[in-house]
Each structure stands twice: as structure tokens, then as C-alpha cells.
Image (tube, rainbow, N blue to C red):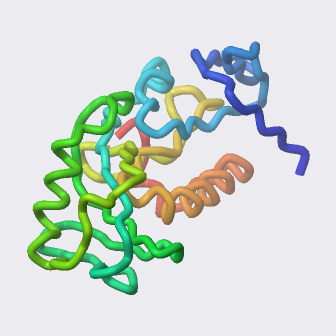
Amino acid sequence: RGGKVVEQAEVSGIRDLGTGVAVGTSQGDLRADVAVVSTGTWLNRLVRPFGVRVPVQSGRGYSFSVPAAGAPARPTYLAGQKVVCTPLGDGRVRVAGMMELAPPERPVDPRRIQAIIAAARPLLRDVDWDARRDEWVGSRPCTADGLPLVGPTASPRVYVNGGHGMWGVALGPLTGRLLADAITTGTAPAELAALHPLR
């Protein structure tokens, strides 16, 4: 629909020009009628100048993969351990868990991997934990009240869609659609009222 994807462009800030916005990037300014900020755990810096005070913090989740032998053959949530096992289809299973509050840039903490192993080991007795690979940590943008930030800021040209925590993959497209409709029609749906970024 005429959109353009600009990759590897670090955003330094947003300016409300009165008739539109200018987004400062490492590749120069981008201009548009409005800006929707959906930058995950890096949201605070960009939207604070527009009155958004609800902090978004990095809640980091860890994962790694192990050989499938001894691991569940279907997606399994070990509720008591707060560990998820997901078959990858290549003879391996992804094991994931943890909620670590830390800066998003911090590297993998090996102690967190060991904590997941210690939690899952009593229930998954025949897993070769030493054959693990693909150790990874990813940041989930979390708010203190658990509700995402979706809607307008103090600027009528700068909007927010972020802070979905662990539900971004599922809720991001839905709130994005609702926000897009609100921007284009000028009428915000009732579902977004509790998610207002200036709450």
C-alpha cells in the first residue's frame, strides 16, 4: 500500500512539526503525518517528551534448545516450574522460561540458563542438558500494571503501541489494527480506553 521499510536506521527522536512529524534516524529524517512508536523496551526515551510517564521495562526471557530425546513431543507448559518446551521439528526442543528484569542490552546470564535446567530436570529426566545450544535472551516490554500502552500521547501526531509484555506477538497486531482505525477515523474504540498511554 505504498509503505516503505527502512532497515538498520537507529531512531534518535521524534519532533512534532505542527503539521506532521519528523523522525530523526541514523539515515536522516523521515517525515510523516503521524508516528506510531512501537519500539519495545526502548519506548520510554522516545515518548517521554510527549507526556508518557508509564515506564516500560525489559522483562527478559531465556531459551535454548536440546535434543528431542526425553523431551515432550508437543508444546508443553510445566506450570509449577514456569518452563515451556516447544518441539522445533529438527530433532530439537526449545526450552524457555524466566523473567529477569534487566537492561535489554545485557548479554545472556549463564545462571539463568542453569535455573531453567534446575527447574525442568525433575520432570524431564532423560534430556541431555549438556547438548544444549542456541542459548538466547530476549526482552519483553513490560509495564508495572501489566497493561500495554496504546493510543495518543500529548501530541495529536504521536501515538504509542507497546508494552505488551509476553503477549506482543498475539496482541500487537490486534492493538495495531485498533489504533490504525482510531487514527484514520478519529474515533478510539472503547477497548483502548484502559490502555491510554497518558493514564
Please provide percent x and percent y for residue 145: 24, 49
- Residue 65 vs 134, above or below: the answer is below
Task: Choose between 170 and 35: the one closer to the eye.
Answer: 170
Q: Is residue 103 left or right of residue 5?
A: left
Please give the name of the residue rendered at 38% of the width and 47% of the height, measured from the top-left corner.
136
Which quadrant holds residue 117?
bottom left
Please provide percent x and percent y for residue 28: 76, 13
Task: Choose between 113 and 80: the one closer to the eye.
Answer: 113
Quadrant of the image containing the C terminus: top left
- Residue 26 vs 81, above or below: the answer is above
Which quadrant holds residue 18?
top right
Q: Is residue 69 left or right of residue 3?
A: left
Please give the name of the residue rendered at 35% of the width and 66% of the height, measured from the top-left corner.
66
Please provide percent x and percent y for residue 192: 47, 56
Q: Is residue 3 left or right of residue 141?
A: right
Task: Choose between 40 and 37: the one closer to the eye.
Answer: 40
- Residue 118 vs 99, above or below: the answer is below
Please give the name of the residue rendered at 29% of the width and 44% of the height, measured from the top-left corner.
59
Numbered disc total: 0
Please give the name of the residue rendered at 39% of the width and 45% of the height, measured from the top-left corner.
138
Q: Residue furthest bottom?
A: 73
Please provide percent x and percent y for residue 64: 35, 57
Q: Residue furthest right?
A: 2
Which quadrant holds residue 163?
top left
